[in-house]
Image (cartoon, rainbow, N blue to C red):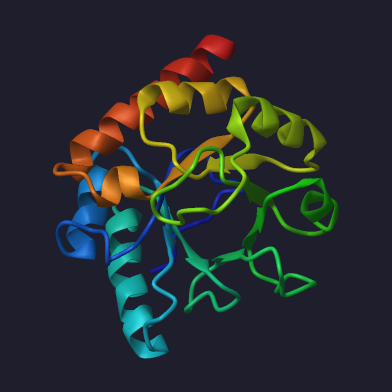
Amino acid sequence: MRTEVARCPSGLVLLTDRRLAREALVDVVAGAVGGGVRWVVLREKDLPRAERLALAVELRAILAEVGGALIVAGPDPLDGDAVHLPAAGPYPPPPVELVGRSCHDVAELARLTTEHYATLSPVHPTRTKPGYGPALGPDGLRELIAASPMPVLALGGIETPDQVRACVDAGAAGVAVLGAIMRAPDPRAAATTLGRAFHRTDEGKQ
């Protein structure tokens, strides 16, 4: 059963990494969804397609129960409707219902065409990709969001409520996290805390 996919991810968005997860990946995602996450990006690109497809089916079932949606990293949607592509390609994007693209600077934002949203990273230094950067910081994020032709998710090293609030203040439509939930002793509690910071800040801007 497919979930109707909204136009753009927003709020707290979870990226997966089974190597960092303290529990089975499906259990971590279920906990995060219980804590309010409604968008999950399935990475795990090293898995054989059959295993990755089976994982996608499990995660879609969890998200479908709350009206959430699964985005698959890479051009293959794994029988779903949403993909997230790297900055390097492919161009043009595949004709699926929802397409996101990783971006890091103005030049990459300028290459966007029919994508529906972009991620901008790294906002902060990240333990997941040490040495990746330089970090944009809130001010750099704000400048790139102003230059983006479409909604932006802030990504990279975002682990605290204060960091989430700064991203919302910079204009991010959503905040994508990985380690903050994958490494958390309680994924549900971590998602609740970060999601609450996002929504309270977003409501305060309206």
Quick check: 164 left or right of 187? right
- Image quadrant occupied by the N terminus: bottom left
Quick check: 81 left or right of 115? left
The residue sitting at the front extreme is: 131
Quarter occupied by residue 50: bottom left
Q: Position of residue 109 (x, y in %)?
A: 78, 50
> Compared with residue 152, is residue 59 higher up or lower down, i.e. above or below?
below
Which of 53/172 is in front? 172
Residue visible at 44% across and 76% down?
A: 45
> Compared with residue 193, is residue 104 higher up or lower down, i.e. above or below?
below
Residue visible at 44% across and 47% down?
A: 126
Quarter occupied by residue 128: bottom left
> Compared with residue 144, is residue 104 higher up or lower down, i.e. above or below?
below
Q: Position of residue 65 (x, y in %)?
A: 29, 53
Residue visible at 50% across and 56% down?
A: 4
> Compared with residue 82, is residue 32 higher up or lower down, i.e. above or below?
above
Which of 43/5 is in front? 43
Which of 16/65 is in front? 16
Q: Position of residue 99 (x, y in %)?
A: 64, 61
Quick check: 153 left or right of 80? right
Q: Position of residue 52 (x, y in %)?
A: 37, 80
